[in-house]
Amino acid sequence: MKRLTALLFAAMIAVSGCGQAEKEKSAETSKNTTEENQKQETVTVELTKENGKEKVEQKEVAIKEGETVMEVMKREFDVKTMFDDSFISGINGIEGSEKDKTSWFFSVNGKEAMKGAKEIKLKKGDKVSFDLHKYE
């Protein structure tokens, strides 16, 4: 009987020890996830009209390494595109107009984009500005 009691006691200690190891592993995973989120790379996306006179929206969004302007815009906004996804013609229901000669233009870090949105890769801290205004 003493042997049975000793075996049961030893089994309980072993099982409770396994549970503690699992809790510690779970806590470590949670800590790593939190640290990963804090290190997450972000960019700022700003939407305006009439050369910045009217603010539409601004938000900070997470990016993945090598992600393009187009990929971020499609994920974070409701966009309408043209020319095989290289040109954004509408954002969140606001579209350019041939009649009014307006279109969405964008810049990255204050420099006007000279390539399509699907060709420009973003880096941590970039500021992407889209502005709907008249073209000549």
Image: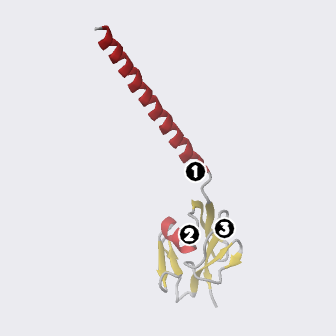
Residue 60 disc label: none
Question: 97 above or below 23?
Answer: below
Marks 1,2: beta carbons within 8 A: no
Which residue is drawn at the image coordinates 53% and 82% (left, top)? 87
Q: Earlier in the sequence, mark 1 or mark 2?
A: 1
Q: Which residue is mark 2?
A: 67
Dot 3 or dot 1, earlier in sequence: 1
Q: Amino acid at mark 3?
A: Lys
Residue contact between numbered discs 3 and 2, judged by CB atoms under 8 Å: no
Where, by quadrant of the figure, is residue 110 drawn?
Answer: bottom right
- The residue singled out by tag 3 in the image is 127
Q: Name the outermost residue toward the top.
A: 2
Q: Residue at x 52, y 71 (%)?
A: 71
x, y percent for residue 114: 65, 84
The three-letter code of the residue at mark 1 reads Glu
Residue receiving disc 1: 36
State the residue lying farthest toward the right: 110
Q: Residue at x 45, y 34 (%)?
A: 22
- Identified by mark 2, the residue type is Glu
Point out the tag, 3 or 2, that comes first from the N-terminus.
Answer: 2
* Residue shown at 57% from the left, 78% from the top: 117
Q: Residue furthest left?
A: 1
Determine the CA span between mark 1 and mark 2: 18 Å
Give the secondary structure at mark 3: strand
In the rendered image, residue 43, in percent from the top left (x then y), is placed at 62, 63
Q: Nearer the viewer, residue 27 or 54?
A: 27
Observer able to see residue 65: yes
